[in-house]
Amino acid sequence: MLQKFHQAGRLAKGNRLINEVGPWSCRRSSSLLQLQMHQKMMANCHWQHNRHHSQNSTNGIRGPTSTDLAYFRSVLSRPDRSILTNLSSSQRATPDEESQNKLARYNQDWTSQYHGDSTLVLRPQGTSEVSHILRYCHDNFIGVVPQGGNTGLCGGATPLRDEIILSLEDMKTIYNIDMHSGILTCDAGSILQNLHEYANDHGYLFPLDIGAKGTCQIGGNVSTNAGGQYFFRFGGLHGTVMGLEVVLPDGSVMHLNMEIDKDSGTIKQGSTHRKDNTGYDLKHLFIGAEGTLGIVTKVAMACPALPTSKNATILVCDSYTNVLKVLQTAKDELGEILSAMELMDYNTLQLVQEHGFGDSGSRLLKDMLQSDPTTQHSEVDRPLFLLVETQGSNSDHDASKMDSFLTHLFERDIINNGFLAQDNKQMAEMWNIRESCNPSVARAGCVYKFDVSIPIEDYMDVAWEVERKLLTARNSFHPTVCVWGHIADGNAHINIVTPGKFGKDSVLTKDIEATVYESVMRRNGSISAEHGLGQSKNDYLSHIKEKSVLDMMTKMKALFDPHGIMNPGKFLPRKKI
């Protein structure tokens, strides 16, 4: 059983008290977006999909033919494994069912909202093969879409039409971890979960952790600048990625703070340094570039020592004002051992309970959601849930700090209830609830997903405002607005669900996107926190970036990829490509 906070006469060791929390209040931003800007955004940011996009965004770029297929067969070491196609050897063929089924998983993103028409998937076995492929495509103006684990949420790894899909899934060697510096080196196709296990086996912690770690690949993580739940503790990939190997669109290979053994093709031990101040640090251009400047093929990542002490608790708050108090108290009292703080709202956990755990359910989740069934929660009194984790190196010291933290929360009437994990199994159950948010809402109905950064004081205001506006504007539309995310760094995952309805309404999509983004921008937030831009948000860049900044991005793209073959129609606004 999880140790539960309960009401008692006085605080005693091993027990926690519950006090009623005061009325909800929350500060709202007073900044207003100019109406003219809002109208311009509405007029220009029309969401289209796939073929309509590609008609105007990939001029001069073509798809592969049987002639191109013959070349790839001649240069790939394992053509039977490395080539997946429905092209015939002599001419374009009408897609047969078997070939189409094999191609389908590469042509569709995780959300099933984006679909491509690629007739050719290439799975190179090493950097040299990636180089051959890109050089040929560059010379022949063939579009290329790099693809990792295909777990993205913005269509960044899905073709707009019939570009070649270049999958890194066969490039998955983990080379080593330097036991002195903690730098782990691997191929870009390495599965994130495997990197965690490898690092753990050697006494280190891989600093990036996200819900899709069982499927996603580190090359895709780097290319989208993935954040995850430990961003607050360890920082982002711009701080933890020490070196990269990148293949440029013309096939040339760059080694950025790493050296490669020419005979074996492996990364030389000790060739990646935590400090290298010799020239422009070009690796940062490829972190978050979504494969538009080149393809990441090898990664060197700095890993911290594996913690020997971990604690986790789930806290229940009656207001967002109290959530902010928990956050500040955690920073003040847990300090250096605070590793993660995740927020989940009531709507989200109801869907997790219904769609995430089956008939058996989770005892912990049931206890968390326990309330008077006759109570109709309004937006202002729905409970909010916080998962707080600490990592350290001294069990007694860390347990004492956690105990003091929880005691002060009770004494200040900040928390309504709480659950403290007693072992690793219970900690895993807590994280399982958090990581079940995304797949659970996907099972509930069609999901309109948003990954945004918001000033922390306004974190919940955007979702509540959007919910009110949508309910007012569309009487027949009854959405469930769910929010979860990384509260410590202001990253909110706002998911608008149509329960039981799985088809996406294009008109409704425009309304929802305009409503969410206007609300975020009015609060000086960011429309993409960690999921990237892909083909779902790139056209908004012209409204949120200064012209000088956007012009420089366009020049960078033209410098690295003058023919525009790399992930065409993504990342930058289509009219700027």
Image (cartoon, grey):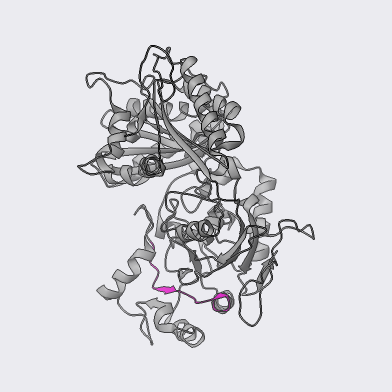
Residue drawn where x is 65% and y is 65% of the image: 560
Q: Is residue 12 above or below residue 180?
A: above
Number of numbered discs: 0
Camera-side residue: 374 or 293? 374
The answer to whether 332 appears left or right of 280 in the picture is left
Magenta stretch: residue 530 in it?
no
Classify the position of the C terminus by image quarter. Answer: bottom right
Q: Residue 494: percent from the left, percent from the top?
A: 42, 37
Give coordinates of residue 307: x percent, y percent. Answer: 55, 46
Residue 295 visible within the image? no
Residue 107 x, y percent position in the rendering: 38, 64
Please name whichever residue, 154 or 283, is drawn nearer the observer in this view of the structure: 283
> Is residue 122 in the magenta section?
yes
User: Residue at (58%, 56%) from the top-left corner?
Assistant: 289
Q: Nearer the viewer, residue 470 or 279?
A: 279
- Location of residue 540 with respect to 535 vertically, above or below: above
Q: Position of residue 138 (x, y in %)?
A: 58, 74
* Residue under the image location 29 percent in, 43 percent down: 356
Q: Is residue 365 left or right of residue 303?
A: left
Tell me which segment is drawn in magenta: 116-129
Q: Is residue 382 visible?
A: yes
Q: Quadrant of the N terminus?
A: top left
Residue located farthest toward the right when viewing the structure as drawn? 278
User: Which residue reaches farthest left?
Assistant: 359
Tell me which residue sits at (29%, 69%) in the image.
101
Work out whether residue 273 or residue 23 is closer to the camera in this orientation and state it.
Answer: 273
Quarter of the rendering containing residue 354: top left
